[in-house]
Image (tube, rainbow, N blue to C red):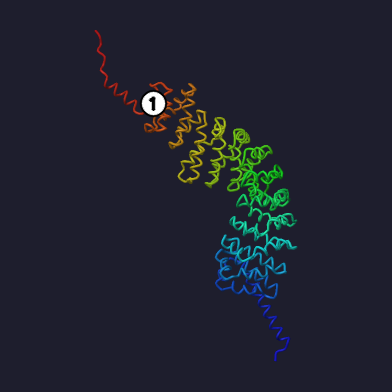
Amino acid sequence: MATARSILQVVESFQKSRTLFARTIAELALKPQNVEILHNAGVLVLLRPLLLDCIPQIQQLAALGLSRLANYSEELAEVFVTEKILQQVLFPLRDINRHNKKAAANVLRAVAKHTAPLAQAVVESGALEPLVHCLEEFDPSVKEAGASTLANIARHNARLAQAVADARAIGFLILCVQEPEIALRTAAGTALSEIAKHTPELSQVVIEAGATPHLAALLTHNDFRVKRVGCLALSQLARHVEDQAEAVVEQEIFPKMFGCLKDQDPQLRRNGATLIREVVKHSAALAQLVVGAGGLSVLIENISDTFGNERLPGIMAVGYIGAFDEMLSSSVIASGGVAAMVCALVQEHEDHIKSASAWALGQIGKHGPVHALAVAEAGALPHLVATFLSKTSSEDLQSKCKKALKNLSDRLSHLPALDSLLQGPMLPEGILKYVLGSLAKVLAADSDARAKFVTSGGFEKLQNLAAEPGTELRECIDLINSVYPVEIVHYYSPGYSEVLLKKLTGAKPAIPVG
């Protein structure tokens, strides 16, 4: 007959076995090469009942293993939906045990991060309310787990972000941003950023909830991770409409955030440039505010010192500033912005960064002859032409280069620059007509320029262009020819030497009078 001690030993042995199993699975799930084997062995179904175990430690180990497995791939995360594991996760999430809550929230975070349908499945399981309650917990790690999960849900689309907002999470997230723990502040700031990024309406909800001053306060924090999130969240608030950008600027973020662009952390530098870009793109007034605070020189230094995708937001910010009016474009030129753009166009290997550089050069030079000349003197024209004609350039890059060349050639009044475009590699008619149109204006007004155009070989190149009668290109050529004597036009026309030879051979010799 079994004694009480022997019975308890059996129960204790079973408990130890469950603990060992859950812990071992959690450890094995750390290594990617083990995940598929564990999945094929059916461990997800075996771990599921352990979420409801009477021993909290076993619940937590089971949740830890499940979160690591769900984090591995979208396919594994989908099993959590089909096998109805999400419903089981909600039980420890609603538990009074804070460790259980944290472990369960991490499972949901791992599932929700992959796709919008998976995040929607988490929402439909009823997880939002207990996740928001996690933000009210005393333990910062529970709050962090809840905030991170809400961020992963909100990031996918506006509908999911609206569901998080409707669950009254924003107010608690703002409180979490003010907590001293770095991990919690970054998680809450990220969640607010993910909510605000989708639509102006969601951004306005975050602003009206009072998030802006607390997010702006993150910019002066000592830790680069907190600054990184502050820049990102404010850029998402500023991106949609001018009024919201002004609400961000009203927090006096300039010039105190310019130091972010000089930080050692690459992501912080990029987020800082992104924040400036999202502000200046809306209006000349906001662009002038950044320039007046000294932001232009900081941006150009950032472009000059960085490479790759880190360079992109700074390039676009300078392009937006230079696009608004002559005065702002002149400020970009005076600050050395054109040279920085040309360097980026030449040095970068990614087409989308080259495209941004070409676009920015066109925006800076489009205002008038002085601005176009500054771009030309920086050596931009041959690089724009070469990039446009390159067979390896993407369609978007070619389009940006073509637009920039049109803007510049249409404004140029500097003969050497226009002549170099004409005598360089053959341009398509769509660009060439702008070059010839500007040449016609310059040559009609300046006799010295007409002579230099002939001696440089440009006039001869003009006569050799194949242009059909009635086309814009033919009209431009005829307009230029009209300011020269007919004899000069004939002399440089193709085949004219043969015409002269025929006249010479066909002429009768003069009969001497005697």
| Residue 502 relative to residue 120: left or right | left
Q: Is residue 116 above or below residue 434?
A: below
Q: Is residue 80 above or below residue 233?
A: below
**Residue 379 image position (x, y, % from top left):** 54, 35
- Identify the residue shown where x is 56% and y is 63%: 74
Viewer-closest of 125 and 448: 125
- Total numbered labels placed on residues in the image: 1
**Residue 321 image position (x, y, % from top left):** 61, 39
Location of residue 294 by image quarter: top right
**Residue 453 image position (x, y, % from top left):** 46, 26
Viewer-closest of 297 and 54: 54
| Residue 481 relative to residue 174: left or right | left
Q: Quadrant of the C terminus?
A: top left
- Secondary structure found at label 1: helix
- Please name the amino acid that badge 1 sits on: Tyr
User: Quick one: which residue is furthest to the bottom in this view?
Assistant: 1
Q: Which residue is mark 1?
A: 492
- Identify the residue shown where x is 65% and y is 61%: 149
